[in-house]
Image (cartoon, rainbow, N blue to C red):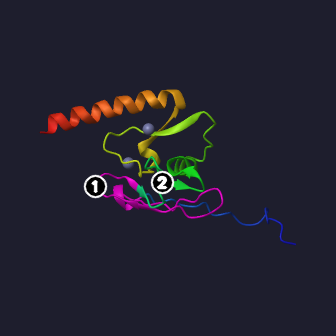
Amino acid sequence: MNGANDGKGKRKDKKWHVGKGSNFKPVIRGRDGDRLPYIEDSRTGCWICTGKPNQFGYPMINCQPAGRIYYEAVYGVVIPDGFQVHHFLPDCPRRCCNPAHLVIVTTADHAKLERQLRQLRRLIEESGD
Ligand SMILES: [Zn+2]
Ligand SMILES: [Zn+2]
């Protein structure tokens, strides 16, 4: 029998060593167990997904936006229908899939937030010169 041996011995809890800043690079796996590919940008902390981008520049994994897949994998949640992941940092590229750089918003709110972000980027560009 291969049943669990409950009475005997303690199961060792996994220890998580979270490195400082950019040293921490977890292996992210999708629902099917595939390892999700990304390269970390050590300057911005962005996780640049190496999946092929769609026509809007968002990388896709199994026909789903990568950001959504990574968010669900890291936080262990399922994003309901009618919600999308949004990159809220002005200098975060669409290829970024770091869940810490993403927020869940409704589809309706998303359009509004994208408009605000475009405005913000313009203002930052203008003030930079
Ligand atoms: Zn980012
Ligand atoms: Zn967005």
The disc at residue 9 is none
Amino acid type, callout 2: Pro
Does residue 112 sit above or below 80 in this rendering?
A: above
Q: Using the image as rendered, state which of residue 92 and residue 1 is in the foreground.
A: 92
Q: Is residue 25 magenta?
A: yes
**Corner quadrant of residue 125:** top left
Rendered location of residue 52, percent (x, y): 48, 59
Secondary element at image label 2:
loop
* Mark pair 1, 2: CA separation: 21 Å
Q: Residue at x 87, y 72 (%)?
A: 1
Q: Residue furthest bottom?
A: 1
Q: Residue furthest left?
A: 129
72 sits to left or right of 51 = right
Label 2 CB-ligand 1 distance < 8 A: no
Rendered location of residue 119, percent (x, y): 30, 30
Q: Residue furthest right?
A: 1
Q: Residue at x 53, y 47 (%)?
A: 71
Whichever of labels 1 and 2 marks the residue nearer the N terminus, that label is 1
- The dominant secondary structure in magenta is loop
Q: Read off the magenta span.
A: 19-47
**Corner quadrant of residue 11:** bottom right
Q: Using the image as rendered, state which of residue 55 and residue 63 is in the foreground.
A: 55
32 sits to left or right of 55 = right
Label 1 packing within 10 angstroms: few (<14), some (14-19), many (20+):
few
Residue annotated with mark 2: 59
Rendered location of residue 27, percent (x, y): 51, 62
Residue annotated with mark 1: 43
